[in-house]
Image: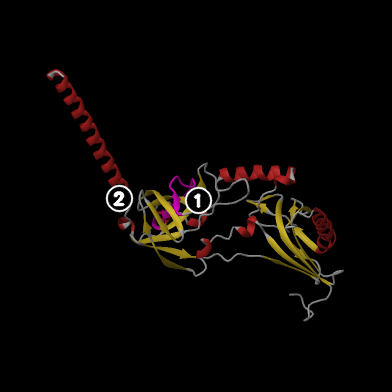
Amino acid sequence: MTRKTINALTLIILGIVTVLYAGCNSSANSGNSKKELISFKAFNGINYSEVARRQKNGLSFNEYGYQLEPQWKMKFVSDDSVSIFSPTKNQFINFPLTRGYDSVFNAARSWLKIKKITKDSIIMEILQAKGDMIDIGGSKVYMLFYADDYVKNVLHSDTTILRHPSRKDTLFVKALAEKANQDIKKAFAARQTVQLKSNSPLVTVKQWHTKPDIMNNFDSSDDYLDPTFDINIYKAYQDFSYSFSVFVDNQGQMSYRIPLVDFMGDNDVKQSYIKVSQSIMNTYLKYYLHTIPGSTLGFVHASTITLNVYGHVAVPATGKNK
């Protein structure tokens, strides 16, 4: 091998080493920047209120009628503690705050990512936990907070007004309502749920209600996504118990949807169950109940509800409805 060849190879090797070294340094520096934990020190003690919660498309409603509601009030106490307002206790409660990488943190059973933070506002993205992993890609749901002082002194408004659904939401819901009223199978959850009122002292109606607390992140959306009613009918032709789902159209008329019982593949039993429960709906329920249809943002529309209907031959022991 000639000296010229050796020198050429040496230069090539040195070049490769230099590139690799630079790449390693670049990776290391990049890794260090990603590992920097976000600090809330500059924002401690500022009261922030959530004024909007929206999807990537800018809507707070989806096609099923689910509404992303801005609910949180919070203030950072330190880099490892945050105070969040509890509507049920009507006070702020301190929660541990765990900081992760890339502006990610955990508080009040939620994983969140700071997209932007100033003393006037915060934009956070809700992250989804999948087993032991966090989807850093996010759920594409964003929370917008304004500092209370900013709302009062700069915007000259209040959070109640700012939390109102947008015009874009209104137009979206209007279109959904029109479709649902043309085709009942396109019914969606009503934000103001169907109301059932008894016309007889022998029929009682009780709607289920979820108590919002920290265990469900103060989310009681099941109350309108799946309105559930217990109906007791006294002096019935026999004792019975049926659970089924019905459509309620924009006129308040009930239509049978599906039974809510597992028949273990026995189609004969299923058909018998449907026949009897549908008959109960068309007689007892339509005769003894006054049904007010559900609505969303002022638009009356078809929606679905769940009914647990219990028949009793006897009347309550006290002689009064429960």
Q: Amino acid at mark 2?
A: Glu
Q: Which residue is mark 2?
A: 36
Residue at figure coordinates x 74%, y 46% from the top left? 184
Residue at figure coordinates x 45%, y 60% from the top left? 73
Give the crowd class for mark 2: few <14, some 14-19, many >=20 residues within 10 Å: few
- Judge left or right: residue 106 versus residue 205: left
Residue 207, magenta (yes or no): no
Q: Residue furthest right?
A: 237
Q: Who comes first in sequence, dot 1 or dot 2?
A: 2
Q: Residue 31: give x, y in percent of width and height.
A: 30, 44
Q: Which residue is mark 1?
A: 53
Residue 256, compared with residue 140, is above or below; it is below
> Which quarter shows the C terminus?
bottom right
Q: Residue 80: give x, y in percent of width and height.
A: 34, 61
Residue 165, compared with residue 1, is above or below; it is below
Label drawn at residue 140: none
**How far apart are the two marked residues, 1 and 2, measured between alpha carbons?**
27 Å
Q: Residue 275: give x, y in percent of width and height.
A: 84, 56
The one nearer the camera, 32 or 245, is 32
Residue at figure coordinates x 70%, y 42% from the top left? 179
Q: Residue furthest left?
A: 3
Q: Residue 313: give x, y in percent of width and height.
A: 84, 73
User: Are circles 1 and 2 on residues that touch, CB within 8 Å?
Assistant: no
Residue 10, compared with residue 212, is above or below; it is above
Span colored in magenta? 132-149
